[in-house]
Structures are given as structure tokens and as C-alpha cells.
Amino acid sequence: MVDDKEIIEDAENVEREEIFSKAVRAGKRTYFFDVKATRRNDYYLTVTESKKRFNKDGRFFYEKHKVFLYKEDFEKFLEGLEESIEFIKANQPLEEMPTEQPVEDTHKEEANAYTDIDFEDLEVGVVASEESNEK
């Protein structure tokens, strides 16, 4: 049987372990940055990539990949990450965007399709408006 003291200690451990959490949604992926504490109260970071996937029967599940990063590795990890990002920015071939008709032109074509209006159809409203101005 579990006593109250064990429950309190477990609750304290959970609180101590969960220090900070940040979720970043990026397209079809979500990244979770979680700061946690060891039993000795040393902080570390877990970075989790989560993607929604589907089984053959159509039910979904979340595929997760996790990286544990400890404080003694923060600087070297950050240096490697920044260097890799800079490399990609400097060397990534530019992709040509597909040419599409500008939105303005599309709207003009749609507007032209509905501009066959006879002003005689509006005459009733104009006459009513003129009568109200005379009074």
C-alpha cells in the first residue's frame, strides 16, 4: 500500500523535473524544448520532434525523436548548430517558385464576369433616393 509520504515525494520529484517547457509548431512538426532537473538538481534540456503519422488502418500516432542535451555540452552544441545553419543559408540552392497569375489579375477576370449590369435596373433605387431628397 502507498502511503501519503511516498505520494508527496513523487509529486515533488515531478515538480522538480519539469522546470520549463516551450512548444514550437513548425509545419507538420512540433518541437518541444523541455528544461528538466536531475535528482541532484542539475538542469538539462530535452528537444523532442513530434510528427503525426498514420497506421495502415488509418489510426494516427505521434512519432517522436528526442535529444538530451546536458549543460556541459551547451556551448559546443550551440556552436555546431549555428555553424550548420549558417552553412545551409550560404549554400542552399535557391528554389524557383512556380509562376502563378497575380491575384489582382484573377480578381479582375472574376469581376469582368459579373459586370453586365444595366443601370436601368438600378433606376428604381435612384428615383426613390431623389424623391427622399426632395422632401
Image (cartoon, rainbow, N blue to C red):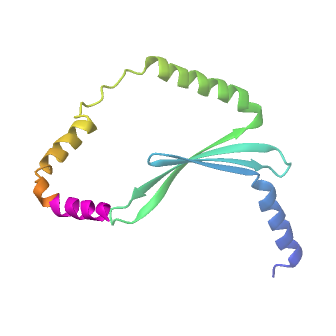
**Residue at the limit of the structure toward the top, as seen here:** 90
Quadrant where the N terminus sits is: bottom right
Near-viewer residue (46 or 106):
106
In the rendered image of this protein, does residue 119 appear above or below residue 109? below
Q: Position of residue 89 (x, y in %)?
A: 48, 22
**Residue at the limit of the structure toward the bottom, as seen here:** 1
Quadrant of residue 2 within the rendered picture: bottom right
Q: Position of residue 116 (x, y in %)?
A: 10, 51
Near-viewer residue (51 or 4):
51
**Is 130 in the magenta?**
yes
Near-viewer residue (93 or 52):
93
In the rendered image of this protein, does residue 73 appear above or below residue 130? above
Secondary structure mainly formed by the magenta segment: helix
Left or right of residue 106, residue 80 in this image = right
**Is 106 in the magenta?**
no
Looking at the image, which residue is at 76% across and 36% down?
A: 71
In the rendered image of this protein, does residue 20 appear above or below residue 72? below
Left or right of residue 134, residue 121 in this image = left
In the rendered image of this protein, does residue 4 appear above or below residue 32? below
Looking at the image, which residue is at 48% across and 23% down?
A: 88
**Count of marks placed on residues:** 0
Q: Position of residue 57 (x, y in %)?
A: 33, 66
Looking at the image, which residue is at 45% across and 55% down?
A: 52
Quadrant where the C terminus sits is: bottom left
Q: Position of residue 102 (x, y in %)?
A: 25, 34
**Residue at the limit of the structure toward the right, as seen here:** 5
The residue range painted magenta reads 123-135
Left or right of residue 109, residue 78 in this image = right
